[in-house]
Image (cartoon, rainbow, N blue to C red):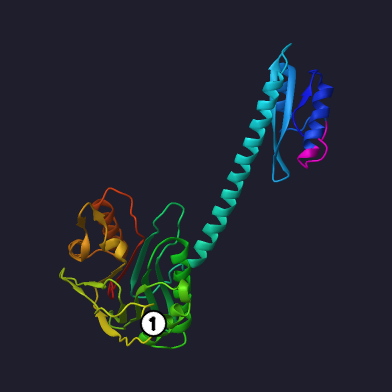
């Protein structure tokens, strides 16, 4: 423990210190005279010619490195300098260890967050799909908003976009419950209202950890004539908007109660037909509630942007909506945002 001084610059002293340091670091004996990685360091120390001090960097009873200090010829380290160097080595070891712990925890957090995101979106014949997702907060990849698109049966696909009350890890935990429960229940052959009613019960079973959840859930089935039939349930979520080829925009569903509040829900599904060229836009309230001072984008602002998207692909529609949201305010978004755009291009005949 503490500083060790080499009073002679002879190579033998450096080699002895090297062996001691490498053993402390758990690296074993140096191979040959000087290992490749440490050779330049020793060469520099030899050129100094005076005293060289090596202080182990110890954190949580582990040596994680070493601090080497040198002085010119005929100069010696005073006792107060050695004490200062020892204090510096302790602080450096603590800083390095904390940085390592932070990096490890960040990697674990990001890995867990990615597990809450759906895998790659499936390819749907006759329907274009695009998703843009932004989680609020530095280092967050998943927040209170979520989306999903998955096959249910032959020719049928389930899609969902939701918003859990709050942001951060607690909200993300509920998004994981909701997304996985949706897939499981939908593939059991249940109708949209039955799926959401059972999900509502699962959320309430969480007790004090339960959170309010707005959710738009639907089933998509492409048709042979080039259109697509959708059955949707909008539980407290911003209403989906339908863009027709003539540029008109209208809500594609009616509002119903949100999830996680009442035990007995009486939900119903509505049928929507997307004709060739039509777009269905689904967003979370992070989009419509984007603010700049006292101004808010709102449903009307979103509708105005969507009316300019006639003839665009699903990807171009989602990108234009996101650009409009980002340009509306200069501050970084304080809420999670998700955009799901679906477009029926129609049948192309030669």
The x and y percentages for residue 337 are 34, 61
Q: Report the side of 216 relative to 312 (left or right).
A: right
**Count of all numbered marks drawn on residues in the image:** 1
The x and y percentages for residue 200 are 41, 81
User: What residue sits right under mark 1 in the picture?
Assistant: 196
Quadrant of res 14:
top right
Mark 1 neighbour class, 10 Å CA radius: few under 14, some 14 to 19, many 20 or more: many
Look at 26% across and 73% down and name the residue there: 239
Query: What is the span of residues highlighted in magenta in the rendered image?
Result: 23-32
Label the magenta part by its dominant secondary structure.
Answer: loop
Q: Report the side of 49 relative to 182 (left or right).
A: right
| Nearer the observer, 57 or 146 | 57
| Nearer the observer, 130 or 16 | 16
**Residue furthest to the top:** 74
Q: Is residue 113 above or below residue 55?
A: below
In the picture, which quadrant includes the N terminus? top right
Residue 166 visible to an observer of this rendering: yes
Q: Is residue 4 above or below residue 119?
A: above
Residue 309 visible to an observer of this rendering: no
Q: Is residue 28 magenta?
A: yes
In the picture, which quadrant includes the C terminus? bottom left
Look at 54% across and 53% down and name the residue there: 106
Element marked by disc 1 = helix
The x and y percentages for residue 176 are 47, 70
The x and y percentages for residue 123 are 41, 72
Quadrant of res 155:
bottom left
Quadrant of res 252:
bottom left
């Amino acid at each position: 423990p503490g500083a060790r001084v080499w009073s002679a610059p002879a190579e033998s002293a450096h080699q002895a210190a090297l062996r001691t340091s490498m053993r402390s670091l758990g690296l074993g004996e140096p191979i040959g005279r000087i290992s490749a990685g440490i050779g330049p360091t020793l060469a520099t120390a030899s050129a100094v010619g005076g005293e060289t001090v090596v202080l182990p960097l110890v954190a949580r009873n582990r040596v994680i490195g070493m601090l080497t200090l040198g002085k010119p010829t005929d100069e010696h380290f005073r006792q107060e300098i050695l004490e200062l160097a020892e204090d510096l080595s302790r602080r450096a070891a603590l800083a390095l260890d904390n940085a390592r712990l932070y990096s490890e925890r960040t990697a674990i957090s990001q890995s867990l967050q990615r597990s809450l995101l759906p895998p790659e979106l499936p390819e749907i014949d006759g329907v274009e799909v695009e998703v843009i997702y932004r989680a609020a907060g530095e280092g967050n990849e998943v927040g209170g908003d979520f989306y999903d698109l998955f096959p249910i049966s032959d020719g049928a696909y389930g899609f969902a976009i939701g918003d859990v009350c709050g942001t951060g890890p607690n909200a993300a935990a509920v998004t994981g419950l909701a997304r996985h429960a949706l897939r499981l229940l939908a593939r059991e052959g249940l109708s949209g209202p039955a799926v959401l009613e059972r999900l509502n019960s699962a959320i309430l079973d969480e007790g004090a950890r339960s959170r309010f959840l707005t959710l738009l859930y639907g089933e998509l089935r492409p048709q042979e004539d080039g259109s697509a039939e959708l059955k949707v349930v909008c539980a407290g979520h911003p209403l989906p908007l339908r863009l027709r080829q003539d540029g008109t925009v209208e809500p594609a569903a009616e509002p119903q109660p949100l999830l996680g509040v009442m035990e007995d829900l009486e939900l119903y599904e509505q049928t929507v037909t997307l004709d060739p060229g039509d777009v269905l836009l689904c967003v979370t309230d992070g989009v419509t509630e984007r603010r700049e001072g006292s101004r808010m984008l709102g449903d009307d602002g979103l509708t105005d942007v969507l009316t300019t998207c006639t003839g665009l692909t699903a990807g171009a529609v989602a990108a234009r909506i996101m650009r409009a949201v980002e340009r509306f305010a200069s501050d970084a978004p304080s809420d999670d945002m998700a955009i799901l755009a679906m477009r029926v291009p129609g049948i192309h005949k030669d």
